[in-house]
Amino acid sequence: MLPDHDAVEWIPATGTSPAVVLTCEHASERLPSPYAWPEEDARLAGTHWAFDLGIAPFARALAAELGAPAVLSRFSRLLVDPNRPLDAPTLFRDVADGAPVHLNTGLDAAERAQRIERFYTPYHAACDAAVAQAPGAAVLGLHSYTPLYEGAPRAVEVGVLFEDDTDLGAAWLELLDGHGYDVRPNEPWSGLEGLMYSPQLHARRHGRRAIELEIRNDLLADPDQVARLVALVAHAVRATLP
């Protein structure tokens, strides 16, 4: 068991030998005290800029189906983005939809360090501990994305992201394709461009395999689609990860 932490929701394994550890870097839009949305940022609350809509319930359902452990963030990605390296320009995003993010305007070094210490570091410590406690388990990152991003529509419905483990990515593409979804490799973001930073980081540290799923968030608003996708992803885990 991992200790409770303000930055992390921890779901323990219910199976004896889980095949995967689930990570969910953008699970919450929560702004823990003393943070609050500036009036100018009210437009961002409840949107994909603040968190990955629908992914937390999906992650919990998949964890229950597989008996797998899961680590979910309990803070908005706009406070600090745990799916980015510490030197990434979007670690503290300051522009969204072409307008300033006032929550992050003029951050000094002390505030950056405080957010990293309070949120980013505990989240990654929890992921690392969860992987260490699940010998042999792969790391599966779970994310969602908006159908319309900065004015550009996205037809892809499920993205399979991979970096080191191209064979695993190919196997998942084959298993997920042909079920009525538009499934594509490394879209709408690419693991080859460092955009599955967190799951790949913790997999490498422990010599494990890593993959990330991106699911278009309109699908996650439909309970029937959620149930169907949970079953489909669980099948992919069981077929490829002993």
Image (tube, rainbow, N blue to C red):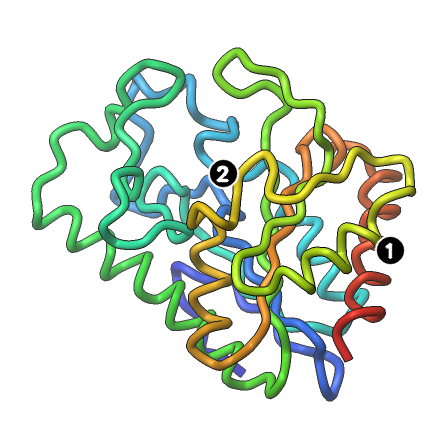
x, y percent for residue 230: 81, 53
x, y percent for residue 21: 61, 71
Above or below for 43 versus 167: above
**For numbered disc 1, what is the local secondary structure?**
helix
Q: Quadrant of residue 225?
A: top right
Above or below for 233 versus 48: below
Quick check: 72 left or right of 65? left
Task: Give the residue type that dot 2 points to.
Answer: Phe
Q: Which is nearer the eye, 11 or 192?
A: 192
Q: Quadrant of the C terminus?
A: bottom right
x, y percent for residue 40: 30, 16
- Residue at the location (56% across, 77% down)? 208
Above or below for 159 versus 2: above
Q: Which mark is residue 231?
A: 1
Q: Quadrant of the N terminus?
A: bottom right
Quick check: 139 left or right of 169? left
- Residue at the location (50% across, 62% down)? 199
x, y percent for residue 10: 54, 68
Q: Which residue is mark 2?
A: 51
Q: Answer few, some or many: residues within 10 Å of disc 1's Cα (few below 14, many 20 plus, some between 14 and 19).
A: some
How far apart in space, not on screen, are marks 1 and 2 (Cα)?
Answer: 24 Å
Q: Quadrant of residue 66?
A: bottom right
Give the mark, 1 or 2, whose residue is nearer the N terminus. Answer: 2
For the residues carrying marks 1 and 2, which lies nearer the camera in this image?
1
- Residue at the location (55% across, 61% down)? 23
Task: Give the residue type that dot 1 points to.
Answer: Ala
**For numbered disc 2, what is the local secondary structure?**
loop
